Image (cartoon, rainbow, N blue to C red):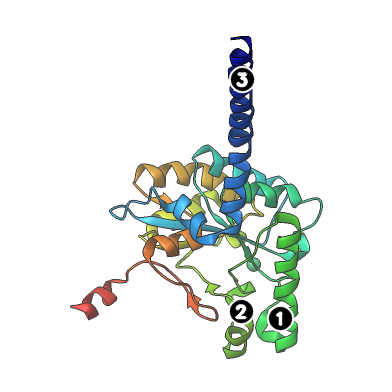
Amino acid sequence: MGKLHDVIGFVQNEQTALNHVIYNSLPDQLARMLVEDREFSYYMSTRDYDPERPVMALTFDDGPKIGNTERILDVLEKYNVTATFFVVGSNVNENSEYLLKRMVDLGCEIGNHTNDHEILTGLDAAGMKAQIKATDDKIKQYAGVDCHLLRPPGGAYNDEVLANAGKPLIYWNVDTNDWETLSTEHVIHEIRTYKHDGSIILMHDLYECTAEAMEVVIPELISEGYQLMTISDMAYAKGIDLENGVNYYDLGMFPDEDEEEE
Ligand SMILES: [Zn+2]
């Protein structure tokens, strides 16, 4: 009997140890899958997507900026929503690493806004590629993720930019003009006026007015039924395959497209 109890005790101990290993390693495995497997990542982040309700992508350019980017991330975290940050490579370093890591932890997407905020139409092909690659490399180095989207500074493009981008080019249909007006009220007003299903909102995480506007607008949009997500998640939710070298201004249905189908 003594021996049987020993065996049972041994099995129970092993099982406890095994459970411990399984439950402790699961979050790590999930986190790795979320970062490495795009399809799985999209599925996880859009599995609660409701096609009956509108979606929107908030996008922030020119950062990251210590302090202000953090404040925007605080709002996103508070309301459990995600956004896309088009970072400038020259702002990505050991000091801002924690901001990029937090973006990834919160499920946000990191896009490429060139290394030096260069107007790409002023560069030759090699110059364009160098600007884009330098930022891709820094995003990989400091955030541990691959970058799949480009937003050209100033929105400037020509055929050569499209040919050398190597990524979809993400524009916008709502320009908040936050950088010019520095007005919280203006940012809120533009989003309230021009928002629709599939909207891409252009903002900059450098400015206090933008962070302040997010504190007002995000809970408001959620209460209206908007589902706030990253560009790639919104494309996945809408069944749109983003193609390299193509400009996207909006991921919604345009009224005239509806008419054409009829
Ligand atoms: Zn910019």
Residue tagged by mark 1? 129
Q: Are marks 1 and 2 in contact (CB under 8 Å)?
A: yes
Image check: 207 left or right of 221? right
Closer to the chain start, of discs 3 and 2, is 3
Q: Quadrant of ligand 1?
A: bottom right
Percent position (x, y) of residue 207?
A: 64, 52
Disc 2: residue Cβ within 8 A of ligand 1's nearest atom: no
Q: State the residue in front, 2 or 237.
A: 2
Q: Amino acid at mark 3?
A: Val
Q: Quadrant of residue 70?
A: top right
Residue tagged by mark 3? 7
Of the 4 image quadrants, the one containing the C terminus is bottom left
- Find numbered disc 3 in the image and state the secondary structure of the residue it sits on: helix
Residue 122 vs 28, above or below: the answer is below
Percent position (x, y) of residue 50?
A: 33, 51
Of the 4 image quadrants, the one containing the N terminus is top right
- The mark closer to the camera, 3 or 1, is 3
- Find numbered disc 2 in the image and state the secondary structure of the residue it sits on: loop
- The mark closer to the camera, 3 or 2, is 3
Q: Mark 3 and mark 2: span between their CA atoms?
A: 61 Å
Q: Are marks 3 and 2 in contact (CB under 8 Å)?
A: no
- Find numbered disc 1 in the image and state the secondary structure of the residue it sits on: helix
Q: State the residue in front, 42 or 165.
A: 42
Q: Residue at x 70, y 68 (%)?
A: 136
